[in-house]
Image (cartoon, rainbow, N blue to C red):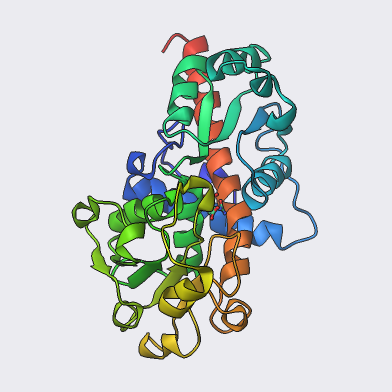
């Protein structure tokens, strides 16, 4: 199935926040992701839809699955993919983000995939460089492709995410995964529950359009999916919870606890996962309930879809400039 089958022009050059997307954009991303998911399961995964374009992976924060997944996505679409190793870059020699960005932009890549510890860094880079930018996680703010891959994974099981009850449990305060998921699940019409100790919830959580719980057993009642989050210790300046053992006792997911959920409840985690802290190791590996590895597989397909659609926008914008439109 080629993109010519669709009449909808994806209107975005960047993916910085889930708030930029409308339900039709999300549907198109999911349709393309479903296509790439099927292609990725065949021995011939290569395509040339991004041939001629260069994707620059610019990760200022540690990443295993997100960076690897973007790299694989770009390569399978035929782009030239360059991983910019920030630990060895001029940023560690004191160069400003703006100078690093302008230097890299002068090399004329087409798409920059950015992860940075500062909220707003991807938007700043988009404005400064004029390049297409995909946010791969900015501080505690957003991680839009993670939210897309999470909802895509659920949609693969359910058809529709709207109307389902989804619980996010753990360190909501420091989590960009939670923020992007809440934004996207709201657009898709899901019922969202949050569960955390008060110290791991933001002070304005009552304005997020979610039902908030401090008691996990109550929060889990009749849930269709539950997503556990890692404690983002790198963003904590002091003690937010007494100990990992105490946290697991109060907020850790186990088979026993899930008995009050829907019988087909799906268990999710964006990774990296701390077994025995936010999730029991047996539950993480339960093939009936855990979709954690499906999330990873969906991640490559969803990022292929996002890069493909942004690549189309780049070519369309270029064509319009050339013809003076
Ligand atoms: C998340 C992140 O970096 O925000 N991981 C990911 O991208 N899969 C969550 C985390 O680090 O806990």
Q: Nearer the viewer, residue 308 or 221?
A: 221
Q: Nearer the viewer, residue 214 or 68?
A: 214
Which residue is painted at 59% across and 55% down in the image? 299
Q: Please tell me whether residue 193 is drawn above or below residue 125 in the rendered image.
A: below
Which residue is painted at 30% across and 52% down in the image? 202
Considering the image in quadrants, where does the C terminus appear? top left
Q: Nearer the viewer, residue 227 or 88?
A: 88
Q: Is residue 30 visible?
A: no
How far across and down, in percent of the image, does residue 158 sit?
Answer: 43, 73
- Could you tell whether 1 is left or right of 152 in the image? right
How far across and down, in percent of the image, does residue 20 sit?
Answer: 35, 39
Q: Please tell me whether residue 105 is drawn above or below residue 213 in the rendered image.
A: above
Which residue is painted at 62% across and 60% down in the image? 296
Q: Nearer the viewer, residue 37 or 223?
A: 223
Q: Please tell me whether residue 126 is drawn above or below residue 6 in the rendered image.
A: above
How far across and down, in percent of the image, does residue 236 sit?
Answer: 46, 49
Q: Hey, which residue is sitting farthest right in the picture?
A: 43
Residue 124, quarter of picture = top left
Which residue is painted at 71% across and 38% down in the image? 48
- Could you tell whether 201 is left or right of 54 in the image? left
How many tags in the picture? 0
Q: Is residue 38 visible?
A: yes
- Could you tell whether 261 is left or right of 47 in the image? left
């Amino acid at each position: 199935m080629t993109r010519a089958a669709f009449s909808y022009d994806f209107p975005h050059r960047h993916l910085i926040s889930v708030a930029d997307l409308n339900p039709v954009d999300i549907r198109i991303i999911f349709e393309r992701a479903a296509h790439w998911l099927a292609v990725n399961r065949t021995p011939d995964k290569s395509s040339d839809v991004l041939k001629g374009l260069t994707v620059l992976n610019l990760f200022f924060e540690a990443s295993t699955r997100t960076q690897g997944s973007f790299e694989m996505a770009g390569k399978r679409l035929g782009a030239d993919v360059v991983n910019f190793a920030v630990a060895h870059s001029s940023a560690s020699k004191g160069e400003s983000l703006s100078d690093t960005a302008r230097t890299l932009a002068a090399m004329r890549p087409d798409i920059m995939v950015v992860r940075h510890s500062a909220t707003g860094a991807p938007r700043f880079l988009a404005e400064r460089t004029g390049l297409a930018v995909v946010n791969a996680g900015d501080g505690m703010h957003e991680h839009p492709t993670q939210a897309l891959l999470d909802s895509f994974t659920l949609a693969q099981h359910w058809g529709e995410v709207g109307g389902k009850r989804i619980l996010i449990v753990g360190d909501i305060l420091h989590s960009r995964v939670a923020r992007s998921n809440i934004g996207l699940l709201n657009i898709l019409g899901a019922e969202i529950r949050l569960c955390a100790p008060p110290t791991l919830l933001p002070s304005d959580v009552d304005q997020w359009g979610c039902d908030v719980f401090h008691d996990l057993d109550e929060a889990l009642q009749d849930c269709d999916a539950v997503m556990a989050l890692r404690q983002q210790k790198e963003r904590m300046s002091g003690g937010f919870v007494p100990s990992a053992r105490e946290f697991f006792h109060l907020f850790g997911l186990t088979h026993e606890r899930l008995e009050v959920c829907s019988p087909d409840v799906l268990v999710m985690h964006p990774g990296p996962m701390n077994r025995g802290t936010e999730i029991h190791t047996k539950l993480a590996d339960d093939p009936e309930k855990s979709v954690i590895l499906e999330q990873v597989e969906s991640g490559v397909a969803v990022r292929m879809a996002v890069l493909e659609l942004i690549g189309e926008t780049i070519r369309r914008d270029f064509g319009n400039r050339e013809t003076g439109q």
